[in-house]
Image: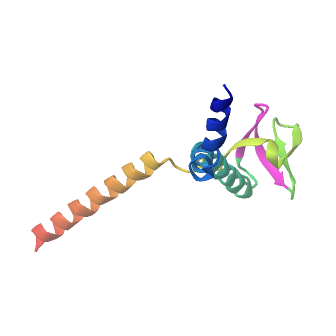
Amino acid sequence: MFNSYLLQAAGAANPQGSLLSMILPFALIFIVFYFFMIRPQNKKAKETQAMLDAMKKGDKVVTIGGIHGTVSQVKEKTVIVKVDDGTKLEFNRSAIATVNNAEGISVKKESKKEKAAESIEEAKAEEEAAVKDSEEK
């Protein structure tokens, strides 16, 4: 029994292998957390901030509480939202969940799929134009 304790102590004398085997899992966990949690959260925060910065008078908004209205005035830290004919409410900018500008276009960023579809359509249009030009010559 005493010999087994000595063998375990002798195994601990090699710190290189055990140090690497301890650090490697933590590094892998950190990498996974970064790509699946931290990075997307930072990206979403930037998109939200850009949406709030682009807000202007006349935009239709929805608050985090579900109140729909039209922006009647934008201040530094707050927004006055016209909810009904005679009803105006003042909200913090952070209480705005979504913003649709006056033309009805959402200020949120387009998804990658939508961008790819648009670029494919543009490429097809350019190709058709090139074919028409070559046929005319």
Residue 110 is left or right of residue 121, and the answer is: right
Q: Quadrant of residue 85?
A: top right
Please provide percent x and percent y for residue 130: 20, 67
Q: Residue at x 13, y 70 (%)?
A: 134
Towards the viewer: 18 or 79: 18
Q: Residue 63 magenta-drawn?
A: yes
Please provide percent x and percent y for residue 42: 67, 51
Please provide percent x and percent y for residue 135: 10, 67
Q: Residue at x 75, y 31 (%)?
A: 66
Give the main secondary structure, helix, strand or loop, of the magenta stretch.
strand
Residue 29 is left or right of residue 84, and the answer is: left
Please provide percent x and percent y for residue 84: 82, 35
Q: Please say if 11 is above or below 137.
A: above
Q: What segment is highlighted magenta in the picture?
A: 60-74
Which quadrant is home to the C terminus? bottom left
Residue 89 is left or right of residue 5, and the answer is: right
Which colouring convention does the figure follow? rainbow
Q: Residue at x 60, y 42 (%)?
A: 11
Q: Is residue 107 visible?
A: no
Q: Residue 9 magenta-drawn?
A: no
Q: Quadrant of residue 9?
A: top right
Towards the viewer: 41 or 134: 41
Which quadrant is home to the N terminus? top right
Residue 124 is left or right of residue 28, and the answer is: left
